[in-house]
Image (cartoon, helix red, strand yellow):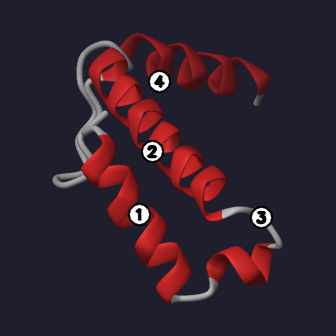
Amino acid sequence: MRGNEFRMELRELVNRHGIDTELDAPDFLIAEYLESFLVIIKQFSTHTGYTPLNNTVGTNLQPTIAAAQNTADTVE
């Protein structure tokens, strides 16, 4: 995502707060996991148009929401 410097800073942060000890997992694995999770969030936002900062949903997700609402209406 952002390269080695970002990953190293994540590792340092994990170590500073003892998260690696608490989870009994190596700091580099936790840093890789967190970085991967950030990539997934970015991909989700790109695909759906969802932007968490202003809590809006883009047009890609609207048909799914409409279908769910129609299904709920027919069940009642």
Viewer-proximal residue, 10 or 66?
Answer: 10
Measure how far apart labels 3 and 2 are at the Cα level: 16 Å
Residue behind mark 2: 35
Identity, as a three-letter code, of the amino acid under mark 1: Leu
Q: Quadrant of the C terminus?
A: top right
> Residue 10 bears which disc, if any?
1
Distance (Cα) linking label 2 and label 4: 29 Å
Residue visible at 68% across and 74% down?
20
Nearer the observer, disc 4 or disc 1? 1
Residue type highlighted by circle 3: Ala
Drawn side of residue 38 relative to residue 1, left or right: right
Q: Earlier in the sequence, mark 4 or mark 1?
A: 1
Query: Helix or strand or loop: what does disc 1 sit on?
Result: helix
Which of label 2 and label 4 is nearer to you? 2
Location of mark 3 (residue): 25
Residue at 28% across, 21% down: 46
